[in-house]
Amino acid sequence: MDKVKFLKTKKIVQKKYPNAKTIMDSYGKYYVATEDGRDICNIQVSQTINSYNFGDEEDLYGFNAALNKVCTIPHSNSVVEAWKQAQVAIKSYHVVERNSNKFNDEKVMKKMAKDFE
């Protein structure tokens, strides 16, 4: 990837996450993080953790099941790859969110009810 393409990719990511930065993990791999250090490619993991409602202290099986539903993206071997992955992740989250809103259960049920009338 040439420098111009890299800067364009970085600009796209920083448009969504203004102070995004590259961080190296403990294994020597790179990822792009928000200004508070959350991995942009795996931001759904932290959202799942923050939104999970523990019924009681022993609800670790449910918590584990919720985390298993979220796919994780491994960290990259280079800085350039990390920024490309972040760009793809942002686009992917947008598509999934947009389509989830279009095809939620309520809308599908209303459409089916209308078709049967």
Image (cartoon, rainbow, N blue to C red):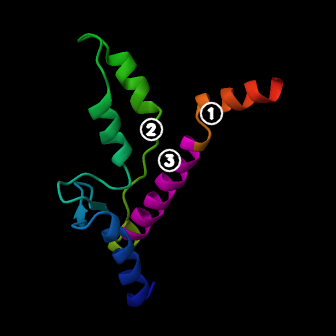
Q: Which residues are magenta?
A: 83-101
- For marks 1 and 3, the one nearer the N-term is 3
Q: Position of residue 106 (x, y in %)?
A: 59, 28
Q: Please give the residue where the numbered disc 1 appears in the rendered image.
A: 107
Q: Secondary structure at mark 3?
A: helix
Q: Amino acid at mark 1?
A: Lys
Quadrant of the image containing the N terminus: bottom left
Q: Please give the residue where the numbered disc 3 appears in the rendered image.
A: 97
Crowding at dot 2, Cα within 10 Å, few <14 / some 14-19 / many 20+, comes out as some
Q: Amino acid at mark 2?
A: Val
Q: Amino acid at mark 3?
A: Glu
- Queried whether the magenta region covers residue 92, the answer comes back as yes
Quadrant of the image containing the C terminus: top right
**Foreground pick, 1 / 40:** 40
Which quadrant would residue 86 be assigned to in this image?
bottom left
Crowding at dot 3, Cα within 10 Å, few <14 / some 14-19 / many 20+, comes out as few
Residue sitting at x 22%, y 54%: 26
Residue 91's tag is none
Select label 3 or label 2 by which is in front: 3
Select label 1 or label 3 by which is in front: 1
- For marks 3 and 2, the one nearer the N-term is 2
**In the depicted structure, whether residue 58 falls above or below residue 116:** above
Q: Please give the residue where the numbered disc 2 appears in the rendered image.
A: 70
